[in-house]
Amino acid sequence: MKGKRTLYEIYWEILTFCRVPRTFTSVIHRCSLNSKIGQEHIGFLLSKGYLRNFEEEGRSLYLTTERAGVFLDAFKEMYLELYNKGPEFKL
Amino acid sequence: MEKETLQRFSGEVMSLYALIVINIVGAGLAMSFGVATGVNNIFPMIADMRIQPLQAALTGLGLLGFGFAISWLVSSAKVFSDFDDLRDEFKKRRGKTNDEEMTQLIVQNMAFYRDNRPTIDRLMLGSRAAGLFFLLSAAVGVFNLLTNAPAGPLGLLTAVIGALICIAIGAVGLYCPSFFERYTRTWEQRLNDSVEAEKKLNRILEG
């Protein structure tokens, strides 16, 4: 995804993308992040226990943990609510 | 919930798409009419080797209108290009109406709005300025018609049609920004609400 996003939106995107195991390269590519920023965000999510890192067939992969569920559910609920509660734009 | 969100989404996407297309058409018409007005008024002065104040004013207004119309068109095209990507995403996800897909679209829309807010402001300014110049041009044209009506029905008809086109472009140019204002109000409200949501998300992350 391109465009200006908040930190929480980027975290949400990384976590939803990593519901299946992903490599670092695929995460930064999908979330349109540069390597340095991607490292920082993934590092933060690892430190919170929302992501876990493991090796498979010589590749380092990231996977979203169950612990991230609280954040993901809250994010989804809040964004759907803020989108639906306000006035709708129509011509 | 998903169906309701999807319907709302669909309506908003269609409305914004129509609005951008109207702006592109309006800006294109304004550009061509600006050039036509400028050229039509400058050539008689060149042929006569004499500056007529009214024709000089119309030439100036036509060329200024052309300049603002370019700015209006460029901004509209930029918004259209980004919005087209968003529309493609929406089309791809339309069949999968689950909460996560909807949330993804909302996040993408917010990113689109944050990115394009300054361009939309420029678009509104270009549209208003072009609208104003075309109304001024119409006023000059009508004044010209009343004080120095062209001889023959064809000349008169052309002048009247010219003034009417100017009025129509001017009205579109001045009126379109009010729809964009409605659009920005809707999204500003959502962005304001997202600040509260961010505080809650921050508490969860720190928890």
Image: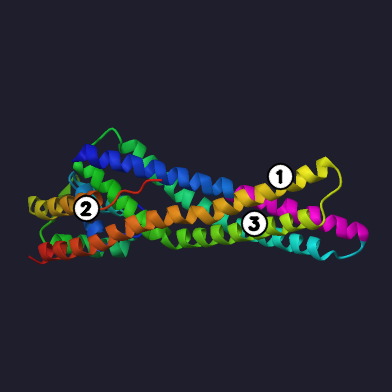
Q: Which one is in front, B170 or B108?
A: B170
Q: Residue at x 23, y 64 (%)?
A: B195
Considering every residue shown, the one lying at the far front of the view is: B146
Circle 3 residues within 10 Å: few <14, some 14–19, many ≥20: many
Neighbor class of circle 1 (other Cα within 10 Å; few <14, some 14-19, many 20+) is few
Query: Is B34 displayed left or right of B123 in the figure?
Result: right
What type is the residue that disc 2 sits on? Answer: Tyr
Q: Which residue is mark 3?
A: B134
Q: Please name which of the two marks, 2 or 1, marks the residue nearer to the observer.
A: 1
Q: Which residue is mark 2?
A: A79
Q: CA distance from mark 3 to mark 1?
A: 13 Å
The amino acid type of the residue labelled 3 equals Phe
Pointer 2 chain: A
Q: Quadrant of residue B5?
A: top left
Residue found 86% across the figure and 47% down from its top: B151
Q: Nearer the viewer, residue A56 or B201?
A: B201
Disc 1 marks which residue? B161
Report the Cα–Cα distance between label 2 and label 1: 50 Å
First in sequence: mark 3 vs mark 1 = 3
- The secondary element bearing badge 3 is classed as helix
